[in-house]
Image (tube, rainbow, N blue to C red):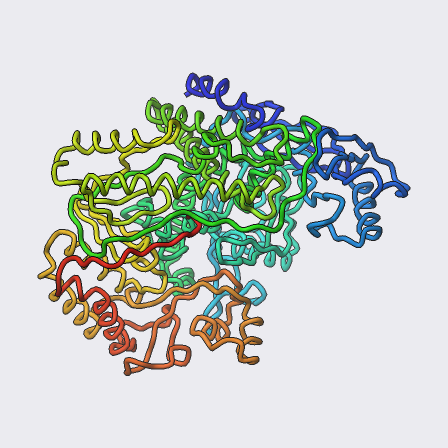
């Protein structure tokens, strides 16, 4: 592995625009220490050392005038170029920076967040230090070299209540499960220790194990909140910091796609906190594969749940502590094992990003890709002492070309894809941001494409698992960055955005993909669907073998300009085209792949998703005569209560606080909704971002769901009360949508469905 890492350093990490201009290796954490100093922690095998570095906070100004009458002390440096922010101001300490910010806000009447403020204030001091110093984290390290500790707690709930509460005197922590990346494990038992002593043992273990990262699943929104509240009750100092300082927290929120998640953000001096629940949110935005964000469901999804894993129902945790604590303790240890395994799948790409971007490892998952790219630009512009422009805030971008020409089932389907279409167009046709006066954009984009190819080779040739994981994480990160450069052009808050260039890119993309479609049609291929940079099609009848397919794609690639490369991205025995961007594929191994929210909507309960998957598999295998029996089996299972309620229950995410929800219902600005009504009645303090699993009760197909619902945890299998008529009607409604292809012809030609939309 060491030899492979030596191959890595000259090609990748010596690129200072990407990895920073200070290549000091093995920095595992940076912490602002006082008003003018940063403490840096380094890992050297099992040993951690630290050193201090001077820190001069910074601000950017539009000319000298904004600070001309300020009485404080600062160094003002003129920056080259025509960008509006043409003065770099550095201060002796953070107090001077805050004084200047207050003065500028009062003088200009503009807050730091105002888009036209003539000063640029950075609220994160550590971000300032990393920008100006050119430092990043973990250089020369692999993910496995990080010392990671996993934490999970189990809690007691007083009889008569549904959920534990840290504020209730009778409730308490019953188990603290710990593990780390070395394989060490410990269960701190509530039978062996008082709650206060359990917390003291936790502090002792963290100090002695000295992890770089503390991981947990929903650790921000449950474990640490509960631990903090109980420690306060017992007057136990949670001195988790590497300097002996206490755990600190503050109210925060983050945006993940359309969801706003509120949480309490915790920080530990010299250590990072990673929440695999948050990482799973990001993963699902890209894949839309997770039905739930619960630890057990995610572990099953990734195949890391042990065959002998211990499961304890959520409403039985207190019972097990009283009557069978050993089972509860095994359950808690399995939780931290699964957290560790999930982190090893989801965390490596963020580890690589921490080697690149001027943000702490803990904060990397909280930043959007365009914001991260903007930080790369800013770091290089500051390094070259070049001025930075304002973002162009007004503009719109017309998206890529999409077209569905065939609806139904098709056999022998190929998918060809233009490799990194938009990045390739930007480089080939020089559609680049005009405000990038020193050319950071094309240099970075070109290097990233080269680096990704090399990282894929190193991952393929890796001699051990550690190397494979590391280089796969590299190539995946490079791919994400490459594809984010186009989005950056149209990002309203990007300082080097360029809406005109973005529109040139999409216009050229539409032209190129339509020329490829026209060529295929001339060869008598049948087009199924076109989506921005890829085409699903049935090849001409004379294309029968794999070599025929490769030649067809090679010939098609010849019509594209040099630098725009086409590849055969997949071959499928069958495809069901439902509507634009919604289709099912049967691959060569007989596995079903479903794409699009219309076929895998979050609005579908598990029984609907399973029926849909089985039905589509039969349809694609040419066995549609079996679908009627499949339908009847599902209807009978519902009628005879043969399955657990999780099969019928729906899980929804709260998008709003309960207070806001109730206010909107009272004002008749929204209708009552089942998950919110259940959350209001529950004793647990639900927050925006929480998920509620519930089922429908009653005995009519059409009922008011908000008034006829129960939490899934309240279902009694011995006395089932789910609404059979309601769920059978939902199954029938789903069947009706696909009836034309189940009972009629296997395919139908529709008028082409054309659209221009943003690429995903």
On screen, residue 60 above or below 604 = above
- Picture quadrant of residue 65: top right
Residue 399: horizontal and vertical position, in percent? 44, 49
Numbered disc total: 0
Is residue 539 rendered to the left or right of residue 83? left
Can you see residue 273? no
Residue 640: horizontal and vertical position, in percent? 19, 74
Residue in the picture at 35% in, 50% down: 402
Q: Return the residue nearer the eye: 17 or 681.
A: 17
Is residue 684 rendered to the left or right of residue 67? left
Is residue 372 rendered to the left or right of residue 671? right
Residue in the picture at 26% in, 53% down: 405
Which quadrant does the N terminus fall into?
Answer: top left
On screen, residue 279 above or below 92 = below
Residue in the picture at 55% in, 56% down: 195
Residue in the picture at 51% in, 57% down: 173
Q: Return the residue nearer the eye: 539 or 129.
A: 539
Q: Return the residue nearer the eye: 577 or 104.
A: 577
Residue 163: horizontal and vertical position, in percent? 47, 67
On screen, residue 482 above or below 605 = above
- Picture quadrant of residue 422: top left
Residue 230: horizontal and vertical position, in percent? 59, 58
Can you see residue 259? yes
Q: Return the residue nearer the eye: 58 or 68.
A: 68
């Amino acid at each position: 592995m060491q030899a492979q890492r030596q191959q890595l350093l000259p090609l990748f990490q010596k690129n200072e625009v990407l990895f920073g201009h200070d290549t000091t290796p093995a920095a595992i954490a940076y912490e602002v220490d006082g008003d003018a100093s940063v403490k840096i922690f380094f890992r050297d095998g099992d040993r951690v050392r630290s050193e201090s570095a001077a820190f001069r906070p910074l601000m950017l100004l539009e000319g000298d005038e904004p600070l001309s009458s300020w009485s404080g002390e600062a160094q003002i440096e003129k920056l080259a170029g025509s960008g509006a922010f043409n003065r770099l101001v550095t201060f002796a300490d953070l107090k001077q920076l805050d004084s200047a910010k207050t003065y500028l806000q009062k003088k200009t009447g503009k807050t730091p967040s105002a888009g036209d403020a003539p000063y640029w204030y950075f609220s994160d001091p550590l971000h300032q230090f990393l920008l100006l110093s050119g430092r990043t984290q973990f250089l020369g390290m692999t993910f496995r070299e990080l010392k990671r500790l996993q934490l999970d707690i189990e809690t007691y709930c007083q009889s008569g209540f549904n959920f534990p509460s840290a504020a209730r005197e009778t409730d308490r922590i019953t188990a603290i499960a710990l593990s780390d990346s070395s394989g060490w494990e410990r269960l701190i038992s509530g039978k062996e220790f008082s709650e206060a002593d359990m917390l003291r043992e936790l502090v002792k273990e963290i100090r002695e194990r000295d992890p770089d990262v503390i991981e947990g699943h929903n650790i921000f929104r449950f474990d640490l909140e509960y631990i903090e509240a109980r420690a306060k009750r017992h007057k136990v100092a949670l001195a988790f910091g590497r300097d002996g300082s206490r755990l600190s927290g503050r109210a925060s929120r983050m945006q993940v796609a359309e969801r706003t998640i509120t949480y309490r953000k915790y920080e530990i001096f010299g250590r990072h906190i990673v929440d695999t629940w948050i990482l799973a949110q990001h993963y699902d935005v890209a894949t839309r594969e997770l039905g739930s964000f619960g630890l057990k469901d995610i572990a099953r999804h990734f195949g890391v749940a042990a065959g002998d894993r211990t499961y304890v129902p959520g409403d039985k945790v207190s019972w097990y502590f009283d009557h069978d604590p050993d089972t509860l303790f095994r359950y808690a240890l399995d939780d931290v094992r699964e957290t560790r395994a999930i982190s090893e799948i989801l965390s490596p790409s963020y580890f690589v990003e921490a080697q690149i971007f001027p943000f702490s490892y803990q904060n990397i998952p909280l930043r959007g890709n365009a914001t991260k790219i903007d930080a790369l630009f800013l770091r290089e512009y500051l390094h070259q002492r070049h001025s930075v422009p304002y973002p162009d805030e007004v503009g719109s971008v017309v998206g890529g070309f999409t077209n569905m020409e065939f609806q139904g089932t098709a056999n022998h389907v190929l998918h060809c894809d233009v490799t990194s279409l938009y990045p390739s167009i930007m480089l080939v046709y020089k559609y680049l941001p005009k405000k990038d006066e020193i050319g950071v954009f094309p240099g970075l984009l070109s290097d990233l494409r080269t680096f990704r190819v090399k990282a894929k080779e190193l991952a393929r040739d890796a001699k051990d698992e550690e190397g494979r994981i590391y280089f796969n994480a590299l190539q995946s990160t490079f791919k994400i960055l490459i594809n984010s450069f186009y989005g950056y052009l149209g990002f309203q808050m990007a300082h080097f955005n360029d809406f005109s260039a973005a529109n040139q890119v999409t216009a050229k993309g539409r032209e190129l993909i339509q020329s490829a479609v026209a060529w295929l049609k001339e060869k008598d291929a049948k087009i199924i669907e076109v989506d921005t940079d890829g085409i699903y099609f049935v090849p001409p009848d004379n294309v029968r073998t794999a070599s025929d397919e490769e030649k067809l794609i090679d010939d098609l690639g010849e019509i594209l300009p040099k630098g725009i490369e086409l590849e055969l991205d997949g071959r499928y025995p069958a495809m069901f085209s439902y509507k634009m961007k919604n289709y099912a594929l049967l691959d060569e191994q007989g596995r079903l792949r479903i794409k699009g929210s219309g076929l895998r909507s979050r609005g579908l309960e598990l029984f609907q998703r399973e029926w849909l998957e089985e039905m589509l598999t039969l349809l694609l295998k040419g066995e549609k005569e079996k679908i009627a029996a499949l339908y009847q089996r599902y209807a009978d299972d519902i009628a005879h209560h043969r399955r657990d309620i999780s099969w019928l229950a729906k899980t929804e995410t709260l998008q709003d606080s309960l207070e806001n929800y109730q206010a909107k219902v009272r004002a008749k600005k929204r209708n009552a909704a089942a998950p919110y009504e259940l959350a209001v009645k529950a004793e647990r303090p639900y927050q925006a971002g929480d998920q509620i699993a519930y089922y429908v009760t009653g005995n009519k197909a059409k009922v008011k769901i908000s008034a006829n619902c129960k939490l899934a945890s309240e279902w009694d299998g011995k006395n089932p009360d789910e609404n059979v008529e309601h769920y059978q009607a939902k199954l029938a409604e789903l069947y009706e949508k696909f009836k034309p292809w189940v009972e009629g012809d296997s395919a139908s030609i529709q008028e082409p469905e054309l659209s221009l939309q943003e690429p995903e």
